[in-house]
Amino acid sequence: MLAVTARPSELSNDQTVHRLARTMGAIYPEAEVGVVRMHTGPAVLLTEETKVPRPVNLLDNDDSPSVVRQRHVFVPIPGRLAMADFSIATENTAEWDDYVAILGQVCKTIRFAD
């Protein structure tokens, strides 16, 4: 799944990016969190794996949890108190590198109007 959402933010500058990275690292200690430099400026990168209980499936007795891997790229929106969250999530971790490449190509297209 590829999604783009806008999230409220206290500020929209470098300080917000570094503060968000520190906060997310504390909230999600199992996740990989860092700051990356994009052509739009710094952004927060978060990668996390989560075990999700399987829903009831009448055709299958496998009740083991499913592993979902997700990556978020939080990009400050200039002039607004918001960040754009570009994210992918998948259970197909064998194809993870391909999904990351797709998200990377999407992020290269990010432009903000003046």
Image (spheres, helix red, strand yellow):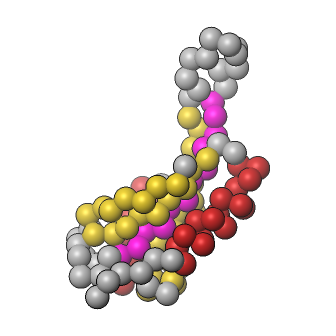
Q: Which residue is located at x 43 percent, y 68 percent?
A: 74
Q: Nearer the viewer, residue 108 or 48?
A: 108
Q: Give percent across and percent down for residue 5.
A: 37, 59
Q: Give percent across and percent down for residue 49.
A: 60, 49
Residue found at the very far top of the displayed protein: 58
Q: Main secondary structure of the magenta part?
A: strand
Quarter of the figure that contains the C terminus: bottom left
Left or right side of 72 for 90: right
Which quarter of the figure has residue 65? top right
Q: Give percent across and percent down for residue 11.
A: 25, 76
Left or right side of 104 for 85: left
- Please tell me whether residue 41 is drawn above or below residue 8 in the rendered image: below
Is residue 66 magenta-colored? yes
Is residue 25 magenta-colored? no
Q: Nearer the viewer, residue 108 or 46?
A: 108
Q: Which residues are magenta?
A: 65-76
Q: Is residue 53 visible?
A: yes
Left or right side of 96 for 1: left
How many numbered tags mark residues here?
0
Residue found at the very far right of the displayed protein: 94
Q: Which residue is located at x 65 percent, y 59 percent?
A: 99
Q: Is residue 30 visible?
A: no
Q: Which residue is located at x 56 percent, y 34 percent?
A: 52
Left or right side of 35 for 64: right
Q: Which residue is located at x 36 percent, y 81 percent?
A: 112
